[in-house]
Amino acid sequence: MSATLIKGTVIRDQIIEEIKADVEKIKAEHGVVPGLVTILVGEDPASISYVTAKIKTAKDLGFKEVQDSQPATISEDELLALVDKYNRDDSINGILVQLPLPKGIDDKKVLNAIDPDKDVDGFHPVNVGRLMIGGDEVKFPPCTPAGIQEMIVRAGVETSGAEVVVVGRSNIVGKPIANMMLQKGAKANATVTVVHTRTKDLAFHCKRADILIVAAGVPGLVKPEWIKPGACVIDVGVNRVGEKISEKTGKKVAILKGDVDFEEAKEIAGFITPVPGGVGPMTITMLMRNTLNSLKFKLGIA
Ligand code: NAP
């Protein structure tokens, strides 16, 4: 039997509608909208395209959006002063500094200068700590893990008591999603195992998973026989494995593959995310939700 597809595009659209409704309500009742600034340093084409997508989504949602583009020659002190300016700007609820930054600028120093209450990416040590504590302490869960959790829950998969196995222990995906799933509370309460390159028997752990979250960045790492029949498989991996000509545009586009062998895995799993069109579309949406929540925290209506 084929698994139920968990489509990020469909869940994204649901959440976007929820955010839009909230923005309109807050605007009517409080006369303000969420404000998001994206600081882009230099002209890296990939960074420009990420920032453009974020700004477009913010605009479509009725946010105040500011794209602050700076030359690659900006000094660290000037960049820190810019962050400080937005920290003090009451109309801004979320500050993003697009990485990578040019050589000579300490990106940790810059990211740590962002006011934790405007750190909508959720990477500031204060927000990492809040995530670890869990419950009401959490303000801004990092966006990709937040999207993963939302997909699992909205697909109707039970997390309480589930065996969750996370492949990968990065600071942006593996560690935070593992931490989120083990918290005491709704959308969590799972028993969590994290595996990585030093794990002795990857297959053994994957086979035990009711919910298998794979974020390794290795195409086809998880074999179909490692999947427990009926499990929920979240494939976070996005791997470029070649190029093709798009039928729509006639332009060269990357061929993307996940960390799971999708075609065979979908015959065994109960739920599965595709690549592309799975976790990918969720990340920017969760960034927008964090920005909206930042304003709600400020207004005391979260
Ligand atoms: P990362 O920082 O490279 O971390 C990869 C993790 O996977 C590491 O912990 C590594 O273990 C583990 N790993 C790698 N190969 C392994 C293997 N053969 N066996 C077991 N564990 C292995 O990657 P990331 O930033 O977390 O991203 C992971 C994937 O998710 C990438 O494909 C990335 O493009 C994708 N991604 C997608 C989104 C999105 O869709 N929005 C967002 C973020 C990332 P060690 O720690 O032992 O080295």
Image: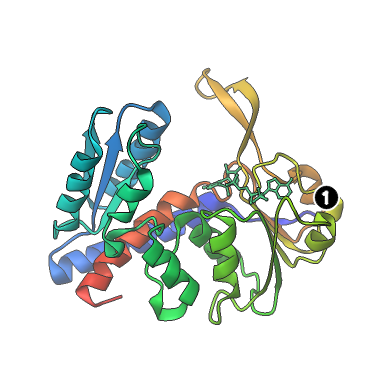
Question: In terms of secondary structure, where does tag 1 sit?
Answer: helix
Asked if disc 1 is less than 8 Å from ligand 1, the answer is: no
**Location of residue 71 (image quadrant):** top left
Residue appearing at x 28%, y 28% in the figure: 72
Res 161 seen here: yes
Question: Could you tell whether 100 is left or right of 300 in the image?
Answer: right
Question: Could you tell whether 277 is left or right of 288 in the image?
Answer: right
The three-letter amino acid code for the residue at tag 1 is Pro
Residue 298 coordinates in the image, percent (x, y): 22, 71
Tell me the crowding category of disc 1: few under 14, some 14 to 19, or many 20 or more residues within 10 angstroms, Cα based: many
Q: Is residue 61 above or below residue 133?
A: above
Residue at the limit of the structure toward the right, as seen here: 225
Residue appearing at x 33%, y 26% in the figure: 43
Residue appearing at x 42%, y 50% in the figure: 284
Res 140 seen here: no
Residue 163 coordinates in the image, percent (x, y): 72, 71
Residue 241 coordinates in the image, percent (x, y): 67, 29
- The one nearer the camera, 207 or 59, is 207
- The residue that disc 1 covers is 224
How many numbered marks have been drawn onto this rendered protein structure? 1
Residue appearing at x 60%, y 74% in the figure: 182
For the C terminus, the image quarter is bottom left
Q: Is residue 41 above or below residue 208?
A: above
- The one nearer the camera, 267 or 289, is 289
Residue 140 coordinates in the image, percent (x, y): 39, 64
For the N terminus, the image quarter is bottom right
Question: Could you tell whether 55 is left or right of 253 in the image?
Answer: left
**Location of residue 161 (image quadrant):** bottom right
Please name the colour scheme applied to the rendered image: rainbow
**Location of residue 239 (image quadrant):** top right
